Amino acid sequence: MSQGKMPLSLPPIVGLQPVPFFPTSMSANLHPMLNVAIKAARAAGAIINRAALDIESVRVSTKQINDFVTDVDQKAEAVIIETLLTAYPAHGILAEESGSEHGAQGSDFVWIIDPLDGTTNFIHGFPVYCVSIALAVNGKVEQAVVYDPTRNDIFCATKGRGAYMNDRRIRVSKRTQLKECLISTGFPYRPGDKLKQHLSMLGDIISQTAGVRRPGAAALDLAYVAAGFSDGFFESGLQPWDVAAGSLLVTEAGGLVGNYTGESEFLHENECVAANPRIYGQMVTTLAKYSKFEAAPKPKKTSVGRAVVDAEVAPDNAVEEAFVAAKPTLTAKPRRIKAAQAAAPDAPF
């Protein structure tokens, strides 16, 4: 771990008063780094809630077509970074708005931050958005917080310690048939996104499920899969800060996360599917043909891809063993892209 300290230069937060953090019965048993992340998320949530009282006064600018950023995103990100680096000045930062500008460069500890996931919802007054904070250690996500400020719900997880919503341990749903499931997703919304492909993919999923929803905040979608509120999630064009925290919530709640072919190296691949083990297998069977990555054949007993095909009839334990490698990681591996899809751009979320 790098011990060097980088000078912190954050935009001023005018009129912001310190937000008190009142520990709950849950916080006493949490990892110290997770407690700091919760404190940061609540501070950002206070900024967001205050701004939501007067949406018309929020300053909105466009990063690219249909991709918005507000002064609220920037203020929330600033207070998160300040809180995290005050506690851990030698840690690195990867944030949606400021990238790697702050924090120690080259640190083994990197905080991955989306200060306001669901900005489009927020600026329209649609109350589905959240704060997402994750800590990656040597490339693997080990701490995660997703905070819904409209409902004051904290979803959090530490690797190996399970996932929680407020004071309650959460688990993914127990449904075993895709036809019974409620699935969430995100739609392409910019020129250059693969709208036709997504509509085809969406049609395949809709025809096999009880319903599909598009809430508009990927981190919260993943938290809902972890809590069993929905049974699965899939989306293309996502960035690490969209899915890092939510992916750990899902795996710690007993679910699986990967790309459309079922492989666990997904954070940098712009495609994500998550669900309980049985539903995950069925979703991957449907979505694999839409993946831009070509997976190499593997033996049946060890292959994640092959086990997925048999997931609907395999015992739960066999499926979970087959996907034991499906853990969130920041380590990107080279991929072979299918020639037919190489020219199609995949815009970031």
Image (spheres, rainbow, N blue to C red):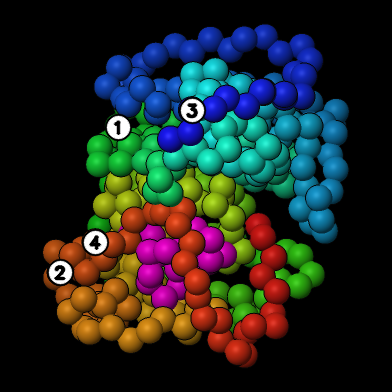
Disc on the earlier residue, 1 or 2: 1
Disc on the earlier residue, 3 or 4: 3
**Mark 3 belongs to which amino acid?**
Gln
Disc on the earlier residue, 2 or 3: 3
Disc on the earlier residue, 4 or 1: 1
State the residue at coordinates (47%, 83%): 294
State the residue at coordinates (33%, 37%): 158
Which mark identifies residue 318?
2
Of 263 and 9, the residue lying toward us: 9
Front of the two marks 4 and 2: 4
Q: Which residues fall within the magenta stretch?
A: 256-271
State the residue at coordinates (78%, 37%): 70
Residue 178 lies, in percent from the top left, at 35, 71
Residue assigned mark 1: 168
Q: Which quarter of the figure has residue 331?
A: bottom left
Front of the two marks 4 and 1: 4
Of 32 and 250, the residue lying toward us: 32
**Mark 2 belongs to which amino acid?**
Ala
**22 to 233, vertically: above or below:** above
Residue assigned mark 4: 324
- Examine the rendering and report whether any part of residue 39 can be seen: no
Left or right of 112, for residue 136: left
Q: Find out whether the residues at labels 4 and 2 contact each other: C-beta distance under 8 Å.
A: no
